[in-house]
Image: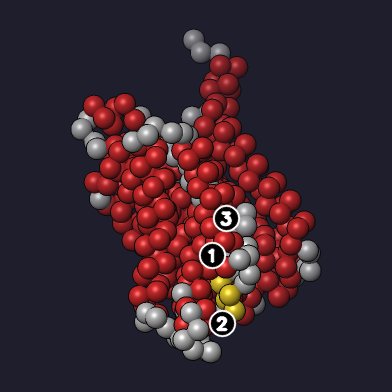
């Protein structure tokens, strides 16, 4: 005969598991709702249409970085170089539009290449850096943290070197449009973010490549035994991450109307935080595009309300660090109770 105490203990365990399941599945959404409610309480302007447009525009740049990083994290890796790739792409996009000035051919903004070609070249630079990261990880067997840390430092130094540490002011109207323009009232960077996020979702949820990424993150050895080309899949993940970081950097050049080698400092931590808040453990094997999107909006909302309250950017970095640490601790707790 089962005692009443045993039944009570069983009910408590079931309730605890249900709560943990809800937190694991919908925790990011709960956090977003709480953050939105709290932010709207602190400032009535937070929910205004103009501020929501600004929030989405600001979030779109981090959103692209976080989406690319998600692919790397799912397969058990990490990419610390995305913010530096972002800065280099932003810098080169403006710099290459001023070649005529630097070479003495003209005295105003001109093009050696059409704008579209410059956008493509800058994006391919990011793809190339991502491939180099992937090759170092898969072929040389160097730990991804070490590889991407070195790339982060090197690429950021390159961004400073190509301009002598100076900001390159002035970009084409086409560049301004992709960074600050709108289509039917919707910011262009937001449309790009939505499009790329949709593609990312389809890849992860409806293609064999998505299945392979999750399989590698859950068990690399089992993935190899099952016939998955692990190195090739990881190469794709790092290349995809570099590509999206560079694409985001190109749009940032339009947003700033300049190439700024200092831009995006610390963005890699925001991207990591967004991915972790969205439900992806840094150990790999789990994660979702929708969760990462929600994580980006959580961080974007916090940054937005701090700006509305007039808080200086440097204290904001403290908030971001606290959010990142909290997200990692929560994810570790949920992982230990699965």
Horizontal side, residue 88 vs residue 201: left or right: right
Residue 111 location (% of width, % of height)? 42, 83
In the rendered image, which residue does mark 2 sit on? 170
The scheme the figure's colours follow is secondary structure
User: Which residue is outermost to the front?
Assistant: 104
Residue found at x 57% / y 55%: 157
Q: Nearer the viewer, mark 3 or mark 2?
A: 3
Q: Residue at x 78, y 63 (%)?
A: 312
Q: Mark 1 — residue?
A: 162
Q: Secondary structure at mark 2?
A: loop
- Classify 10 Å Cα crowding around label 3: few (below 14), some (14-19), many (20 and above): some
Query: Would residue 189 be seen by someone viewing this image from the given angle?
Result: no
Residues at circles 2 and 1 in contact by the CB criterion of under 8 Å: no
Mark 2 packing: few (<14 Cα in 10 Å), some, or many (20+)?
many
Q: Is residue 35 visible?
A: yes
Q: Mark 3 or mark 1, which is nearer the start of the sequence?
A: 3
Label placed on residue 157: 3
Up-down: is 253 above or below 141? below
Q: Say whether marks 1 and 3 touch (CB < 8 Å).
A: no
């Amino acid at each position: 005969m089962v005692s009443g105490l045993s039944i009570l203990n069983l009910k408590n365990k079931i309730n605890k598991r249900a709560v943990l399941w809800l937190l694991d599945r919908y925790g990011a959404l709960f956090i977003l709702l709480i953050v939105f409610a709290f932010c709207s309480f602190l400032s009535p302007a937070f929910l205004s249409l103009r501020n929501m447009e600004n929030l989405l525009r600001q979030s779109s740049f981090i959103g692209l970085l976080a989406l690319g990083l998600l692919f790397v994290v799912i397969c058990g890796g990490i990419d610390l170089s995305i913010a530096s790739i972002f800065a280099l792409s932003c810098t080169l996009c403006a710099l290459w539009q001023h070649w005529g000035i630097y070479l003495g051919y003209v005295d105003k903004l001109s093009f050696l290449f059409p704008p579209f070609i410059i956008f493509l070249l800058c994006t391919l630079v990011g793809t190339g850096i991502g491939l180099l990261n992937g090759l170092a990880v898969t072929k040389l067997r160097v730990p991804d943290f070490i590889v991407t840390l070195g790339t982060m430092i090197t690429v950021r130094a390159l961004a400073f070197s190509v301009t002598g540490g100076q900001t390159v002011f002035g970009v084409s109207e086409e560049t301004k449009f992709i960074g600050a323009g709108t289509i039917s009232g919707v910011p262009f960077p937001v449309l790009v973010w939505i499009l790329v996020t949709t593609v990312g979702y389809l890849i992860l949820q409806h293609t064999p490549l998505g299945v392979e990424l999750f399989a590698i993150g859950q068990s690399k050895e089992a993935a190899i035994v099952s016939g998955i080309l692990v190195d090739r899949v990881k190469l794709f993940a790092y290349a995809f991450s570099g590509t999206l970081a560079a694409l985001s950097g190109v749009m940032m050049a339009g947003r700033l109307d300049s190439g700024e080698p200092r831009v995006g400092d610390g963005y890699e931590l925001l991207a990591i935080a967004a991915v972790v808040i969205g439900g992806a453990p840094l150990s790999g094997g789990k994660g979702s595009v929708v969760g990462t999107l929600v994580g980006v909006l959580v961080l974007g909302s916090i940054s937005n309300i701090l700006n509305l309250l007039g808080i200086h950017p440097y204290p904001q970095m403290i908030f971001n660090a606290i959010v990142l640490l909290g997200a990692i601790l929560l994810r570790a707790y949920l992982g230990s109770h699965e």
